[in-house]
Image: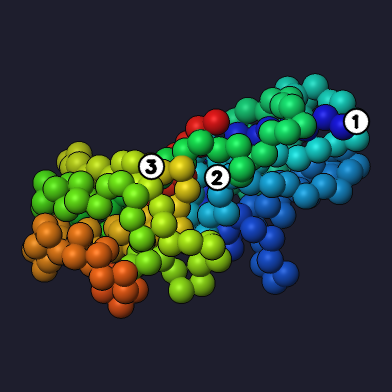
């Protein structure tokens, strides 16, 4: 039975997230409906990361199996046709070995968070950034971010609904830089806890505003207490950028 690996781009704004839900449209449901439309087979896709409602993806990865051996180019073309008018695009489709798993074969996940840091609210970038009108110190945010790299208990930055067996994670990268009016946060790890990137971003904002000292982020981490986390950043500014295999 052939296995197909998809690389997917989507605007998460109109969806309830990646995962199927009974009462609203998800990215997973839209893609699985498109697969059935061209192949006649009802399948269940497996993904590298179940993004939340409103979160975007530049290169999400999913896999699925079909009974028939289709040419990967035809699969991607057919899916892009049947996915219209949803804001989802199949960037690439490849045949992979049967032991490939989009989630468990992944070696690293890379996220980007965008903060629009200016007085005027966004017009063109609405639903694509977090608008913060108060000036932020990107250098202080970056310095704070470096203090929590490595393997730690990230309970402070973990959703209460997180289903991971352990709060221990290894944060390989957390960089903050300014490009004009944008504050760009880049985060990389083999795996993240539920809401970890958005929670860290919300706390970094407090550093950028001067409400927390640079050392405050590490102090919040060491507390291993969710109540020490800053207000979680909204989903609109978060992008799944790439998955390494």
Q: What whole-number distance in Å separates the C-alpha atoms at marks 2 and 1?
A: 27 Å
- The numbered mark at residue 68 is 1
Could you tell me which residue is drawn at 18 percent across and 42 percent down? 178
Question: Where is residue 111, by image quadrant?
Answer: top left
Q: Considering the numbered disc 3 on the image, is that residue within a helix, a strand or a loop? A: strand
Residue at image mark 2: 10
| On screen, residue 29 above or below 80 | below
Q: Is residue 116 left or right of residue 75?
A: left
| On screen, residue 227 above or below 15 | below
Question: Closer to the camera: disc 2 or disc 1?
Answer: 1
Seen from the viewer's position, the closer of residues 196 and 129 is: 196
Q: Considering the numbered disc 2 on the image, is that residue within a helix, a strand or a loop? A: strand
Q: Is residue 223 left or right of residue 79?
A: left
Residue at image mark 3: 188
Could you tell me which residue is drawn at 12 percent across and 59 percent down? 215
Quadrant where the N terminus sits is top right
Q: Is residue 123 left or right of residue 3?
A: left
């Amino acid at each position: 039975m052939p296995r197909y690996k998809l690389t997917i781009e989507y605007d998460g704004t109109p969806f309830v997230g990646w995962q199927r839900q009974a009462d609203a449209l998800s990215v997973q449901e839209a893609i699985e409906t498109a697969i059935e439309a061209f192949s006649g087979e009802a399948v269940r896709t497996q993904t590298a990361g179940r993004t939340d409602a409103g979160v975007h993806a530049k290169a999400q990865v999913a896999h699925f199996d079909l009974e028939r051996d289709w040419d990967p180019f035809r699969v991607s073309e057919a899916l892009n046709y049947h996915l219209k008018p949803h804001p989802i695009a199949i960037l690439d489709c490849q045949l992979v070995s049967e032991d490939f798993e989009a989630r468990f074969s992944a070696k690293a996940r890379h996220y980007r968070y965008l903060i629009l840091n200016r007085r005027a609210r966004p017009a063109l970038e609405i639903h694509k950034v977090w608008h913060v009108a108060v000036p932020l110190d990107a250098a202080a945010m970056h310095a704070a971010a470096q203090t929590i790299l490595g393997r730690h208990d990230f309970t402070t930055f973990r959703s209460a609904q997180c289903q991971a067996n352990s709060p221990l994670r290894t944060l390989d990268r957390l960089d903050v830089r300014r490009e004009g009016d944008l504050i760009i946060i880049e985060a990389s790890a083999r795996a993240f806890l539920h809401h970890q990137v958005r929670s860290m971003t919300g706390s970094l904002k407090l550093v950028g505003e001067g409400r927390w000292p640079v050392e405050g982020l590490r102090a919040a981490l060491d507390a291993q207490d969710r109540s020490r986390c800053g207000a979680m950043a909204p989903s609109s500014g978060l992008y799944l950028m790439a998955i390494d295999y």
